[in-house]
Image: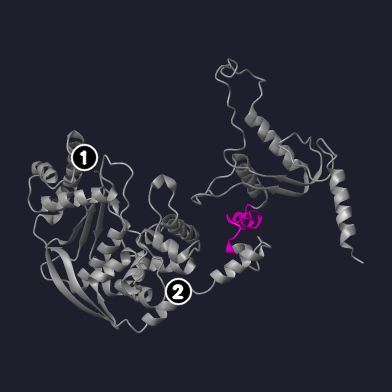
Amino acid sequence: PFVHEKVRAALSERLSASGNASGFLAGGVQFCAMVPLRSLPFSVVCLLGLDHDALPRRAQPEEFDPFASTRRPGDRNAREDDAYLFLEAIISARRVLYLSYNGRDPQDYSERPPSVLLEQFVDTVTAGYYREAPGDWRERAVLVHPLQAFSRRQFEPDSPCFSYRRDLAEALAGASMPHPVIERMADLSDAFDGVIDFAELLHFWRHPVRYLLRQRLDIDLGLAQDVLADQEPFEPDGLERWQIRTQILAWLRQGMPPRAVLAHLQAADRISAGPWGTLIADQHRDEVLAIHQRFEACGGAQPPRSMSIDLPLGDMRLVGQLNDLTPDGLLRIESGPWKPRHTVEAWLSHLVLNLVAPEGVQRRTIGLGQGSELDCLPISDAAEALQPWLAHYRMGLTQAPLPLLPERLLAAKSSDPFEKRLQTRQKAFRECVVPPPQTGRPPDGYLAWLYGEAQPIDRYWCTEAEVLVAPIPQVRKVPT
C-alpha cells in the first residue's frame, strides 16, 4: 500500500543526503557557470541564457591596467575561451543538448538576437546536415516559449509548451467567451442600407476599429483627454507642430508672402516669444514652403474645385463630394510627412476620380508630402479595384472588427515571400499595440482594448490586405 508518511520520509532522507555533496561532478543535477568539461560524457547538457550580450563575454579591463593596451601573443582572450567552452559543452552532450536564449524583450516584445556562437552552431548544423530543407529543421529544432505564463499557447492540446496552472486555465476559459463587441455587432447587420458617404469611407479607413467603436457602437475609451504636463514645453509637440504647419500651408495657398508668416504666427500666439520661437517658425515655414513650391509646379497654383458624386456600385451606392480637383488631376498636399493613411485616402479618391471622370480634369492623382510623392496614373478597372474596399467597409461595420489599418496594409514589400510579408504585418500590428520605447509613441488603446495580446493578422487577413493594396503605386522618396 502507498503510505504518504513513508514516501515523505524517503524523500527527506534523499534530499538531506544530497545536500552534503560538494564540488563539481558530484552526481545528480549540477548547476554551474561555464566551466571546462574536459569532454567528459554527460547524458544531458543544458546551456541557458545564450543571449547576444552574454556570450562570448566582453572583457572590461580596468582603466589603470597598463597590460590591457599592450597585449602579446599568448595572453588570454575571454572571447576565445568562451568559444572553446561552448564547443566542449557540445561535445560532452550524449543524449540531449539544450540551448536557450531570451528571444524577446520582456518590455516591448521586440526580437532579440541570440549569441553569435549559437547562431554559428545552428548555421553549421543546417549547412552540414539539413541543406536541402533548412527551414523544416529550424522549425522542428527551435522551440519558442511564450513570454508570459498565462499565454493561451500553454493550454492548447497540441502545443509543445504546456502548463499545469489550473487558475490560469480557468481565467483563459473565461477570456475565450465572445467579446461584447462581437455580440453587439449582430444587431448592426440590418442597419446598413447600402448607401456609403465618401467622407465616412475615408474616415473609416484611417482606423477601422476606432471608427466601429466610436461611430457605430458609441464606445469611447476616453483616450484623447488632455493631461496637464509636469513641465512647460520649450517646443511644440507633435500635434502642435502639425497644426502650425497646416496653418502655414493654408496661408501660403491663400497667397500670403512667406516673409509674413512669422508675424501671423506670433499674432495668433502659435509660437513662443523670443529667438527660440522665431527659429522654430522659420524652420517650419521653410519646410512647408518647399512642399508648396512642388505643389504649385504640379498644377496646384490653380484654385481647386469640388464635385458631387453618386455612383451605383452593385448593391451599394457611393455618395458625397470629391475635392481637390484641378485641370491637372486630383492634387493632395500634406504639410508634414506623407503617411500610409494619406496613401489610402489618395488611392480611394483616385479610384472615384476615374469612375466619375469629370470633364476638363485629368484622371491622375498626385500626393505630396515632406520628402515623399505619390503619383497615381489613370486606371481602367477602377470599379473592380474599389469594390473590395467597399466590401470590407461593410464587413467592418456589420460583421466583424477589421484589423487592417493603413500602417499594416502598406507595411510589407510585395517582392518578399508570403511568409515574410505575413510576419512583417504581424509585427507592425503588434508595434501599434505595444510601440517600441525608442519611438516615443503611445500604445493604440482601441486595438489593445479589443484584441489584448491576440494577434488577429493571420494568413486570411494578410491575403485580404494584399488584394486591397496590390494596385497602389509605390510612394517615391524625393529630396527635401
From the viewer's side, name the closer residue of 257 and 107: 107
Callout 1 crowding tier (Cα within 10 Å): few <14, some 14–19, many ≥20: some
Q: Quadrant of the C terminus?
A: top left
Q: Amino acid at mark 2?
A: Pro
CA distance separating discs 2 and 1? 47 Å
192 over 442 or under it: above or below: below
Which residue appears at 70% of the width and 49% of the height? Answer: 98
As for residue 145 lying within the magenta part, the answer is yes
Q: Amino acid at mark 1?
A: Ile
Q: Magenta stretch: give its range.
A: 131-152
Query: Is residue 95 at all visible to an observer of this figure?
Result: yes
Q: Is residue 293 left or right of residue 75?
A: left
**Callout 2: SS:** helix
Q: Mark 1 — residue?
A: 280
Could you say where residue 271 lies in the image, as x and y percent from the top left? 19, 43
Callout 2 crowding tier (Cα within 10 Å): few <14, some 14–19, many ≥20: few
Could you say where residue 468 lies in the image, as x and y percent from the top left? 36, 67
**Callout 1: SS:** helix
Could you say where residue 394 lies in the image, as x and y percent from the top left? 34, 76
From the viewer's side, name the closer residue of 287 and 200: 200
Q: Quadrant of the N terminus?
A: bottom right
Who comes first in sequence, dot 2 or dot 1? Answer: 2
